């Protein structure tokens, strides 16, 4: 796989997987030419609802090179305090409960529970998982965060893991549901 990534021209690497782009993201000497699009979308949401992440406690659950790692490094570069975890992290619920901003991308359906979320946190659920659903007569799509539980505690929850995009401002200001 590495040989394939190296064969990509870094100036045309819109997925941000060429070693040059990854190194620039990590070492902070230069801005990467590209950041993977999903990670960039998450960063846009975070910056829209939390314009300054300086000193904020961020937990990123998922360490892929196209979502978790670029988000973690980008937020570190903005002076957030970032903890990077995965589904095997011990005491994950305790760690996520400390997060002002929680980004989840682990590919485990409804893995993060509401009791694992700090009241008032910003939650970005990147997960897209297909699960069996007898009530719907087949399957449905869910995120990595259990929405019904998260909605009770977080300030903002965003996910596109369904037939619609949900961005729920639980502070009471607005609820956005965009049907495709």
Image (cartoon, rainbow, N blue to C red):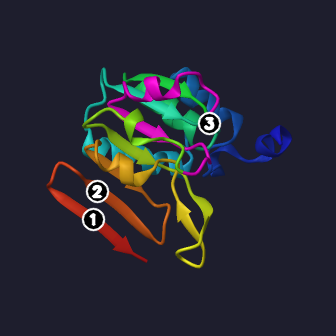
- Distance between the alpha carbons at the discs numbered 3 and 1: 34 Å
Q: Main secondary structure of the magenta part?
A: loop
Q: Hey, which quadrant is residue 129 in on the image? A: bottom right
Q: Earlier in the sequence, mark 3 or mark 2?
A: 3
| Farthest residue, direction left | 173
Characterize the local packing of mark 1: few (<14), some (14-19) or many (20 or more) Cα atoms within 10 angstroms.
few
Q: Residue at x 77, y 43 (%)?
A: 5
Identify residue for label 1. Answer: 176
Comparing labels 3 and 1, the label whose residue is closer to the camera: 1
The span picked out in magenta is: 87-109
Disc assigned to residue 21: 3
- For label 2, the SS is strand
Asked if residue 114 lies left or right of residue 14, the reply is: left
Residue 128, horizontal then vertical, whole percent: 56, 57
Q: Residue at x 38, y 28 (%)?
A: 97
Disc assigned to residue 30: none
Identify residue for label 2. Answer: 168
Q: Residue at x 38, y 36 (%)?
A: 115
């Amino acid at each position: 796989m590495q040989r394939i990534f190296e064969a990509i021209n870094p100036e045309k690497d819109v997925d941000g997987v060429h070693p040059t782009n990854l190194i620039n993201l990590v070492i902070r000497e230069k801005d990467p030419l590209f950041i993977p699009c999903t990670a960039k979308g998450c960063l846009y949401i975070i910056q829209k609802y939390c314009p300054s992440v300086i000193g904020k406690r961020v937990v990123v659950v998922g360490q892929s090179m196209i979502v978790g790692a670029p988000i973690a490094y980008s937020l570190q570069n903005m002076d957030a305090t970032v903890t990077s975890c995965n589904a095997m992290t011990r005491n994950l619920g305790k760690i996520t409960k400390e997060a002002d901003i929680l980004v989840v991308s682990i590919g485990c359906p409804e893995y993060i529970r509401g009791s694992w979320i700090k009241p008032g946190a910003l939650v970005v659920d990147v997960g897209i998982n297909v699960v069996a659903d007898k009530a719907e007569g087949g399957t449905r799509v869910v995120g990595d965060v259990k929405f019904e539980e998260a909605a009770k505690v977080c300030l903002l929850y965003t996910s596109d893991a369904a037939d619609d995009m949900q961005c729920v401002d639980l502070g009471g200001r607005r609820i956005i549901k965009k049907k495709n």
